[in-house]
Amino acid sequence: MITLRRLREEDAKMIFEWRNSDFIKNLGSQQREVSWEEHKKWVEEAVQHTDNLIVFVIEVENKAIGQLTFKKAYENTYVISIYLLKEYIGQGLGTKAINSGIEILSEKYENISVAAFVIKTNLHSQRAFEKANFIRILEAKSLRINIPNDHYLYMHSNKKKIPHNRLTFGQEEIDAISRVVATGYWAGGKKVQEVEKKLCELTQRKYSILVSSGLSALRLSLLALDIKKNDEVLMPAYCCVALVNAVLSVGATPIPVDISPIDFNITDENINQHISDKTKAIIGVNTFGNPISLKIRKNIAIIEDCAHGLLKANMGNKGQISISSFYATKFVGSGEGGVVMTDDSEIAEFVRDWRDYTDKKPSAKRLNDKMSDLEAAILATQLHRIEDFIIKREEVARRYYEMLKELEQKYTFFSLPKFHHDKVWYRFPIRVRIKQKEFVEKVSSKNVGIAKPIENWLENEIEKFPNAKAAYEEVISLPIYPTLRLEEQELVIKVIMESLNHIHNE
């Protein structure tokens, strides 16, 4: 745990020795020894706690490991400097100290600006400041600060980070929750039934049963299909681990299948390579909103996972069962929640019964899988606007495509997703085939949230699935949601362009 405390008089000797050590001296702008008289005067000013010079000692477990200083340059602009003892470099402690110091300063003073001079050859410090939301300034004419020739100027960005995901909600959701709270009936009830009816209307399914999560929907679907020990369930090698967990929870064996490099979905051709006498079900995912198309097979059930896409191209109306997740960051959310949709009355009756354990015989497979009316109230408002959400996401996707397509032509290591009308833009997945980690770090340092959308659960087994392996390594998703403002998206695009140019020119 890193902490900051204000400089004290008794720290003078310790800090003097630090400042004149070869390692710290070479990090400084002046790169010279400091006299005791000069140092003593500096300490006296710092311990007076004036606005002009604010000095912190950085501590870890009560051990002093470095110094953080804010020196007033003019008006409300401060210049920050930091050093750590050599053995503490490269552990992320500098970034944490910088963030803590700025937070303390911001609580005391309003609308401050913080600048930093970093030696051009000091890569550790550059990374530390970039991770702390500092941006390198190329043009500083408007600032009354002289920049040493061998230094870069960084300024702290006060802008809030553009997140990878952002919830879309308003007064409608707040009012809906308030009305349910006021009724005094918070568990599953009339609101759940209302949303189940709405989902049937949207997907043209006969039955819709709300449950507690997408994982619950998958698990209950497998139980309804009598999937059990020694059975095999085929699924994409590139998918959320929830699919794997659901199959394992009923004692069956998950069988990964390689994906298409175009739409990230499993294909009939790849499925045929893995079908055996033990294959009892196939879970197909509308990955990133790309609609899946699978051939119906005798004695093999198809479960369509619609967590990434509903409505378009008959998504939600394929196979024996369609399921979805309504987790907070899905394209319609209820905080937590899921649904099982089917045209089979026996499956519907089973799921409706097995989502509840109350007054039933003991069973390790019968859990509490119900959705509450509170969650259903939020979901009802989201479903009311689902078509508008889909349209707005497509508008964002089109802007990305128009603004970034030149880079796809310029760089062979970069590509955009294919654009087609049937897609629901739950994600905007780009491919970066070189220096992916460096690219993500570079973009993230500019207050733009990007992420690898799916984590590899196959570990060493991934080598058997080349398309899935490439997707895990190369695919990065950009911010895309209905509330992404035009100016925010323009900044995302600018940062993506700069970061691609950076890794290309290195």
Image: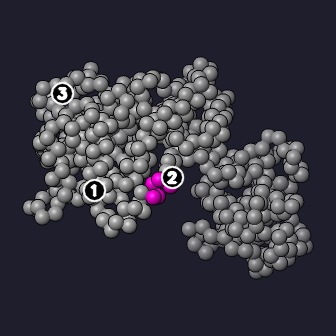
Question: Looking at the picture, does residue 439 appear above or below residue 369?
Answer: above
Question: Image check: 477 left or right of 357?
Answer: right
Residue 110: quadrant of the picture: bottom right
Q: Earlier in the sequence, mark 3 or mark 2?
A: 2
Q: Earlier in the sequence, mark 3 or mark 1?
A: 1
User: Which residue is rendered at x = 14% and y = 48% of the image?
Assistant: 350
Residue named by callout 1: 190
Question: Can the viewer see residue 128?
Answer: no
Residue named by callout 3: 275
Q: CA distance from mark 2 to mark 1?
A: 23 Å
Amino acid type, residue under disc 3 in the picture: Ile
Q: Magenta span covers which residues?
A: 171-175
Question: Looking at the picture, does residue 176 appear above or below residue 59?
Answer: above
Q: Residues within 10 Å of mark 3 (few under 14, many from 20)?
A: some
**Residue 63: x %, y % from top left:** 62, 72
Q: Of discs 3 and 1, which sits in the foreground? A: 1
* Front one among 349 and 415: 349
